[in-house]
Each structure stands twice: as C-alpha cells, then as structure tokens.
Amino acid sequence: MFDVEVIEDPAAAEVSLDPVRSRLLAELAEPGSATTLANRVGIGRQKVNYHLRALERHGLVELVEERRKGNVTERVLQATASSYVISPAALSAVQPDPERAPDRLSARWLLALASRLVRDVGTLLTGATKSHKRLATFALDGEIRFASAADRAAFAEELAHTVTTLIGRYHDENAEGGRDHRLIVAIHPKVRST
C-alpha cells in the first residue's frame, strides 16, 4: 500500500468521490471483507460488495486474499493507498493552466501552479511506479511569521533574487544528457486549524 496515490482517470475520480466509497476506502487502510465492512459502516453486505467492485474495477482497492467459508469464498480487499489526491488531469479540458495568466502575487495563479505540480508529479510517479524506479524529487516546507506586510514583501523580493541567482549558477542550457526540472517556491498565509 502506498502512502499517497494520485488519481488521474476521470472515472476513477468519480468513483472515489462517492461518500460511501470514500468511507470504504478509508476503512480499507486495513484489509477487510464485505462482511466485516458492512458491520463497520452499517450498510448491507450486498451493497458493500457493489461498491467494492466499482473501487476494484478502477484500481483503488486490490485483492489481498480469498478465504473459503463453507460454500462461499470470502474476498479480502485493501485500499491501494492510505490517501488519494485527484490530479487536475482528471478534469482535462478545464484543468488550470498557469501559463494563461502568470502573476507572482495572485493566489489563483499559485493555485494553478499547485495544480500543475500535482498533475506533473502524479504523472511522473505513475511512470516511476510502472518501471519500478524511484522518482528523484526534493521538497522543503516551513513556516515563517512576518511582523508586517512590508517585511513579507521584502522577504519575497530577497527570496526571488536569491533563487534566481542560484538558478543562474546551476542551469546549463547545453548540458548533454541533462534533464530539465521545475522549481516552485510559494508563500501563503497558514490556515489556522479549528
């Protein structure tokens, strides 16, 4: 089971968004059968089986084992991941395009960049998984508290200058066999937990 899996297929996204099915996905972090799940979620075994088949058809759950119980074979399933992210690629024609309106200070442009990040990393991760390779990535996450809007603006300006200088030092347009990478640096207010 993966920690996070990216859903790129529109039909799989639709299946995963059904409230009963998303609850079953959460319950299947640990292997379970339709019978055990029916008891946990409070709906009939046949209805659970119906939803499990839909999830299995779209690769969101997988068979772990089959147990023989009298004349019946009990199928034990598990979710393919602990959590899921739906890629903007699932929305194809209406997915955000950060090239449309680049604006370093726009929250909507930041959202379009984040959407492209999810789409691209999801696509790369799917390819790496299929070829049994690791995907080389790096991420940095931190918090900073600014005393004023002026401090935040000064920080953003200095950060942009520093990153641009660093890119200039390492970017080699003519590197034979080199591979292009995308860099995203973002600052946004922290969401307060309730």
Image: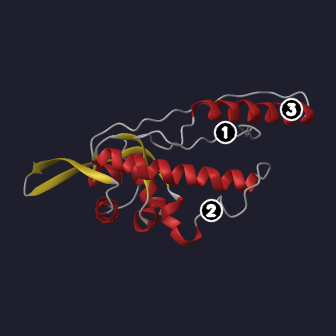
**Residue at x 59% of width, y 70% of height:** 94
Say left or right for 105 vs 78.
Answer: right
Q: Which amino acid does label 3 sit on?
A: Ala
Question: Cα distance, mark 3 to mark 2?
Answer: 28 Å
Residue 41 shows in this picture: no
Say left or right for 191 vs 52.
Answer: right
| Residue closer to the observer: 62 or 99 | 99
Say left or right for 38 vs 17.
Answer: left
| Residue closer to the observer: 21 or 171 | 171
Question: Cα distance, mark 3 to mark 1?
Answer: 15 Å
Mark 1 lies on residue? 185
| Residue closer to the observer: 77 or 41 | 77
Q: In the displayed structure, would residue 146 be above or below residue 47?
A: above
Task: Give the image location of residue 186, x and y in percent.
Answer: 69, 40
Tell me which label, 3 or 2, sits earlier in the chain.
2
Q: Which amino acid does label 2 sit on?
A: Asp
Tell me which label, 2 or 1, sits earlier in the chain.
2
- Which of the 4 image quarters holds residue 128? top left
Tell me which label, 3 or 1, sits earlier in the chain.
3
**Residue at x 42% of width, y 40% of height:** 176
| Residue closer to the observer: 155 or 28 | 155
Which numbered disc covers residue 154?
3
Q: In which quarter of the image is the C terminus?
A: top right
- Please say which color scheme the image uses: secondary structure
Residue 148 shows in this picture: yes
